[in-house]
Image (cartoon, rainbow, N blue to C red):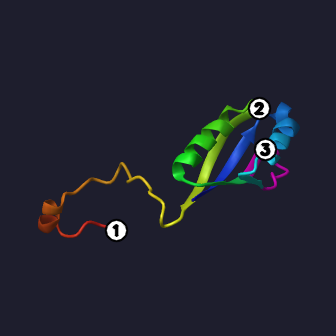
Amino acid sequence: MAISGIVITIEQTDLDRVRVWLAAQPDLELGEAPASAPERLPATLDTPSYRAAARRLAELERFPGVLKVDVVHVGFEETDDVPANPLTPRVSRSDRSQTGPSPR
């Protein structure tokens, strides 16, 4: 399961229409937009996997009136198959004995 904290930026002229649509989405829990930035709506997206979260975020961004979706947090359950960090160098088992244990 992937729980994503997101901020949805909505076109000023479409605030009401987009909020109604977002409120009808069963996988979203909407927060309160700040009075100083009513076009920035915080929300929580609850999906079964990180792949489903990625697909869902792309769908949300394509909805007319949504300018962008910023991901501010993603939490995974320990049993999820999370992809490796592409910035972490891969070390083979034989290399570990020479360089010590890999960082955790």
Corner quadrant of residue 96? bottom left
Rendered residue at 53%/51% (across/down): 50
Residue 22 marker: 3
Q: Which residue lies under the disc numbered 2?
A: 65
- Label 1 near label 3: C-beta < 8 Å? no
Under tag 1, what secondary structure?
Answer: loop
User: Does the segment drawn in magenta span residue 37?
Assistant: yes
Under tag 3, what secondary structure?
Answer: helix
Q: Which residue lies under the disc numbered 1?
A: 104
- Label 2 near label 3: C-beta < 8 Å? no
Rendered residue at 52%/47% (across/down): 51
Residue 101 image point, x, y percent: 22, 70
Q: In this rendering, which labeled residue sits more in front, label 3 or label 1?
A: 3
Residue 1 image point, x, y percent: 57, 59
Going by the numbered disc 1, the residue's amino acid type is Arg
Under tag 2, what secondary structure?
Answer: loop
Going by the numbered disc 2, the residue's amino acid type is Gly
The residue carrying pointer 3 sits among few (fewer than 14), some (14 to 19) or many (20 or more) residues within 10 Å by Cα, namely some
Locate residue 1 relative to residue 43 in the image: left or right.
left
Residue 80 marker: none
Residue 14 image point, x, y percent: 83, 33
Q: Earlier in the sequence, mark 3 or mark 2?
A: 3
The residue carrying pointer 1 sits among few (fewer than 14), some (14 to 19) or many (20 or more) residues within 10 Å by Cα, namely few
Going by the numbered disc 3, the residue's amino acid type is Leu
> Which range of residues does the magenta coloring cover?
31-42
Rendered residue at 71%/44% (across/down): 8
Q: Is residue 37 visible?
A: no
**Mark 1 and mark 2: Cα distance apart in space:** 42 Å
- Label 2 near label 1: C-beta < 8 Å? no
Which secondary structure class fits the magenta region best? loop
